Every structure is written in structure tokens, then in C-alpha cells.
């Protein structure tokens, strides 16, 4: 079928204003802000509801046209740039906040709801509740974030964002509209079980198994007061011990740490930020005192940040902000890796060597999740988008860092095509076999984000 026919069929589903194959519309969808090369897109489509998604999927499946679901397109690792052409399905118009259940504490959302939209809606209408959201720009979608095992300021206490999904509505490649979680048998989207938990199939599968049209997200009570305990640690190898001590107090809402060469006073140190909360101010100052003691015992220099910085840190901890554009030209990508805590000091030291080798100032950050059960480490590389050599430099650094994370027992997170192959190469063969069988069963025509996570 030729492109004009396809366009006409898609227009019949969503209307002329919400599908395009004009070069100027496709240009922006053929790239992302990271280091991946741009790749061609054939169509972009913006459905309004589940029924439209279903019609598009049935049509694409019949014609064997690839579909790439896209939220905010902010993962930086090329996951929404088509590998084999096809239709980018931009979920922006499906942005309905369907229900906020205050008692069972969940939000039922359309897949296009953004993190900024949900946050401001709750602040205005349910100020006692807070959502789990990442530190990414507010145009990132909740669906895009939870589906990739994202993390944020509530992850220390409550785990990664994939575990905050209570239920999903998914359009499968055969056009079935399937529900997963309690919503499969109840009017309440309050739980994933106790039935076989298939939600995990759709997390970190990067749009390769179906299109999520609705999701239920856990919400949490919002404490009245928040503060941050800031410290500098000289000895890298003390990181695990310090973090174990902090988490043993049970006081931390969020723990962030990192290494960066700018501003100058941070050079040579690991900065450690522990966020604490309370319902009365006395509780906060009491907790602050306890944590100061923990910091000092671990030889970590407690520092009171200037008010302006403290406010910034409380609003949104921005890792690497000072270094993100150090090469000029606006390129930035990072390897995020879930790591075992005991290998973090080595990861920091070896990743700093990779940075220096590629002439990028070391910029490494971490966030502790679920106590100390996982720590996510971000190894960031800035590059000049206008300079192909610099782009290649960044890609080489990312490749070596993925290899490093795997060597140290870590798991690279939301990896780009090259990193996916490194992960698949190391993966247990029977895990891979099952992955392939599930993909073949659910998406036999391989229309869903093909080229990503393909087991050869
Ligand atoms: C400055 C900056 C800071 C960041 N900080 C954080 C952070 O603190 N924590 C964090 O977790 N991440 C962070 N990120 C990474 C990323 O931006 C976020 O994880 C973001 O939430 C991803 O959401 P998105 O809507 O952009 O997803 P997209 O990039 O649009 O999609 C992500 C993946 O999910 C798939 N997908 C999207 N929607 C659907 C759907 N409806 N159905 C099926 N599949 C779908 C896509 O195909 C893709 O594979 C940061 C990024 C930047 C640029």
C-alpha cells in the first residue's frame, strides 16, 4: 500500500488534523535530545482515546506497519525514534485525569498525562497528596516514566516507579483492549494482585508489547515540612557504609549523592544530600540533628547550603545542571544503571576515568531506592550536537560505561540500541528465550517498536 493510502486510512480514524507525513512535522520525531543518530519516521499520529488507538493498531497490524508509542520523548536514549520507520504514536491528547481516589490513594490517568500536569492538579485540588514523579522536565509523561522503571524523590521509601503502578489498560497488537491488575475484576484500580501479575511484562519493555492507554498510579500523603541535610565525603570507599547508616535511621525521604567537578568547591568530594520530612518543625530539627551526627561519625563534612541553593535543592535536585552544557551545543545523555551498593565506589572511580579519557568533566549522580536494595547511578556526558566528532566521543563513552556497569554486576537502565545488545549478550539464555517467545506470542508481526530489544 502506498503512503497516500495509508495517510487516508489513518485520517479516517483520527481526522485530518491529527496525523501527518509532512517533512516539517516528522523532523522533530526523527530525533531526541540524546546522542542517538536521527532516523526516518513515516507518520506521526495523535489519537484521542482508546478506541482510536485500537483502530490504528488493528490497521497497522493488518498492514504490518511499525508503531512506536511516545510520551514526552525524553528518555534521551533514542527509544522513541523508529528503528524501522513507521508510525510514531504521540500520546499527548490522551491527557485526562480520570479519577483521584483519596481513600485508596491512587490516580487513574490517561497515558498522555504529564508529570507537570498531575503535580499541579494535585497541588491545586488535593494538596494533602503527592505523586511519585522523576526530576525530568514536566513534559515527561507519567506513563513513559513508570513504564521504564523511572525513579524520583519517593523511591527511597517506596521503590522505583514501575512498582507504583496499580493497574493498566493496554491495547495489544491484535487489537484486544486488556486490563491488568485489580481493574481486571473490580471497579477499583487499587492493586496489582492477588492474581498473576502481568504488569511486569509492560515495564521496561519499551513499547514492544502493546500500547498503554490508561494507568493507575499510587499516591502518597504529603508531609508539611521538608529539608535537606547536605554533606561532603572525602573517601569514596566509605559511600556504602555512610548510606547504610543513613538508611538505618529510617528518617530519609530521599538520598542523592554524586561527584562533579563544578562548582570548584565540589571537586574531590562526594556530595551527599539526605531529604527529611516532618509534620511539625520540631520533628524536622530533631531529625536534622540525628542525621548530622550520622554524617560526622562517617567523617562526612556537614554543610549548611546558602538559602538560595537550599531552596533550589528542595524544589528540584538538578544533577549535573552546571555541567550539562559544558561542551556547548546542547547535547546531553547519561548511562543510568541499577547497581549493587557495594560496587558503587569502584563504579564512581572507573567512570571518572572514562570521562577524563573522553575529555568530559566527571559528572556522576546516584539515588538510593528501597532502603539500600538498589542504587541507581547516572554517568553523564555532555557533548556538542553540532560536532559529529563530539557526538561520536559521547557514544563511545556511553558504550564503555555500559560495559563497566555490566562488569560490576549492574544493569544499564533504559539503554539505547547499542547498550541493549550488550545487555542481551550477557543475559541468561533461558531468560532471552522466554523474552523471544513472549514477544512472538503477543506481537507475531513485530509491529511494536521493532528493532528495540530484539532477541536475534
Ligand atoms: C534533565 C532530565 C532529568 C531526568 N531525570 C530523571 C529522573 O529523575 N528519574 C527518571 O526516572 N528519569 C529521569 N529522566 C529520564 C526521562 O526523561 C524520564 O524517565 C521520563 O519520565 C520519560 O518519560 P517520557 O514521557 O519522556 O517517555 P518516552 O521517552 O516518551 O517513552 C519512554 C519509553 O516508554 C514507551 N512508552 C511511552 N508511552 C507509552 C505508552 N503509552 N504505551 C507503551 N509504551 C509507551 C516508549 O516507546 C519508550 O520506549 C530525566 C531526563 C532528563 C532529560
Image (cartoon, rainbow, N blue to C red):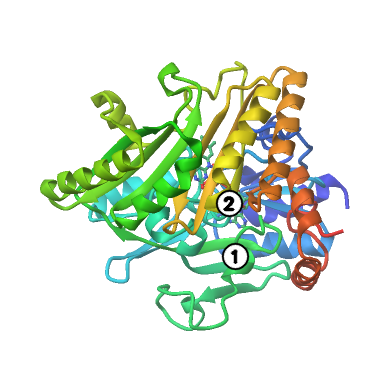
**Residue at image mark 2:** 338
Q: Is residue 133 left or right of residue 237?
A: left
> Residue shown at 44%/56% (left/top)?
96
Q: Position of residue 363 (x, y in %)?
A: 55, 29
**In this orientation, does residue 82 appear?**
no
> Residue shown at 70%/28% (left/top)?
394
Within 10 Å of disc 1 (Cα), the crowding (few <14, some 14-19, many 20+) is some
Q: Please, what secondary structure does the residue beneath circle 2 have?
A: strand
Q: Is residue 316 left or right of residue 328?
A: left
Within 10 Å of disc 2 (Cα), the crowding (few <14, some 14-19, many 20+) is many
Q: Is residue 425 left or right of residue 380?
A: right
> Residue shown at 45%/59% (left/top)?
159
Q: Nearer the viewer, mark 2 or mark 1?
A: 2
Depicted 31 relative to depicted 60: above or below: above
**Residue at image mark 1:** 51
Q: Tell which circle, 2 or 1, labels the residue nearer the N-terminal end.
A: 1
Q: Position of residue 136 (x, y in %)?
A: 48, 40
State how many labels appear: 2
Q: Please, what secondary structure does the residue beneath circle 1 have?
A: helix
User: Which quadrant holds the C terminus?
Assistant: bottom right
Amino acid at each position: 500500500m502506498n503512503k497516500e493510502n495509508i495517510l487516508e486510512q489513518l485520517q479516517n480514524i483520527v481526522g485530518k488534523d491529527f496525523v501527518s507525513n509532512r517533512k516539517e512535522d516528522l523532523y522533530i520525531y526523527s530525533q531526541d535530545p540524546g546522542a542517538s543518530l536521527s532516523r526516518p519516521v513515516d507518520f506521526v499520529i495523535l489519537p484521542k482515546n482508546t478506541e482510536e488507538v485500537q483502530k490504528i493498531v488493528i490497521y497497522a497490524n493488518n498492514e504490518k506497519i511499525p508503531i512506536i508509542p511516545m510520551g514526552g520523548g525524553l528518555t534521551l536514549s533514542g527509544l522513541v525514534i523508529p528503528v524501522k520507520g513507521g508510525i510514531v504514536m504521540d500520546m499527548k491528547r490522551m491527557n485526562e485525569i480520570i479519577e483521584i481516589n483519596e481513600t485508596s490513594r491512587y490516580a487513574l490517568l490517561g497515558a498522555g498525562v504529564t508529570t507537570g500536569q498531575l503535580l499541579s492538579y494535585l497541588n491545586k485540588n488535593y494538596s494533602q497528596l503527592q505523586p511519585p514523579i522523576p526530576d525530568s522536565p514536566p513534559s515527561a509523561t507519567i506513563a513513559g516514566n513508570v513504564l521504564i522503571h523511572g525513579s524520583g524523590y519517593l523511591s527511597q521509601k517506596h521503590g522505583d516507579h514501575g512498582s507504583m503502578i496499580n493497574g493498566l489498560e493496554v491495547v495489544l497488537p491484535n487489537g484486544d483492549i486488556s486490563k491488568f491488575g485489580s481493574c481486571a475484576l473490580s471497579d477499583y484500580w487499587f492493586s496489582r494482585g492477588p492474581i498473576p501479575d502481568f504488569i511486569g511484562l509492560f515495564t521496561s519493555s519499551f513499547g514492544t508489547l502493546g500500547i498503554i492507554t490508561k494507568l493507575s498510579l499510587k499516591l502518597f500523603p504529603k508531609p508539611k515540612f521538608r529539608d535537606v541535610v547536605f554533606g561532603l565525603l572525602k573517601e569514596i570507599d566509605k559511600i556504602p557504609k555512610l548510606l547504610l547508616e543513613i538508611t538505618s535511621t529510617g528518617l530519609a525521604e530521599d538520598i542523592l549523592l554524586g561527584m562533579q567537578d563544578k562548582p570548584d568547591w565540589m571537586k574531590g568530594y562526594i556530595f551527599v544530600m539526605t531529604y527529611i520530612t516532618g509534620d511539625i518543625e520540631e520533628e524536622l530539627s530533631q531529625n536534622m540533628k540525628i542525621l548530622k551526627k550520622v554524617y560526622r561519625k562517617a567523617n562526612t563534612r556537614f554543610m549548611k547550603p546558602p538559602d538560595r541553593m537550599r531552596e533550589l535543592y528542595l524544589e528540584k535536585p538538578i544533577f549535573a545542571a552546571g555541567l550539562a552544557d559544558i561542551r556547548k551545543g546542547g547535547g546531553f545523555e547519561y548511562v543510568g544503571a541499577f547497581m549493587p551498593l557495594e560496587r558503587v565506589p569502584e563504579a564512581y572511580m572507573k567512570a571518572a576515568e572514562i570521562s577524563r579519557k573522553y575529555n568530559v568533566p566527571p559528572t556522576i549522580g546516584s539515588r538510593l531506592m528501597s532502603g539500600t536494595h538498589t542504587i541507581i547511578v547516572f554517568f553523564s556526558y555532555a557533548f556538542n550536537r553540532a560536532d559529529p566528532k563530539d557526538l561520536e566521543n559521547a557514544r563511545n563513552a556511553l558504550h564503555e560505561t555500559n560495559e563497566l556497569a555490566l562488569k560490576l554486576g549492574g544493569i544499564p537502565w533504559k539503554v539505547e540500541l547499542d547498550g541493549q545488545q550488550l545487555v542481551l549478550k550477557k543475559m541468561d539464555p533461558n531468560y532471552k528465550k522466554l523474552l523471544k517467545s513472549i514477544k512472538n506470542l503477543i506481537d507475531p508481526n513485530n509491529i511494536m517498536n521493532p528493532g528495540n530489544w530484539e532477541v536475534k
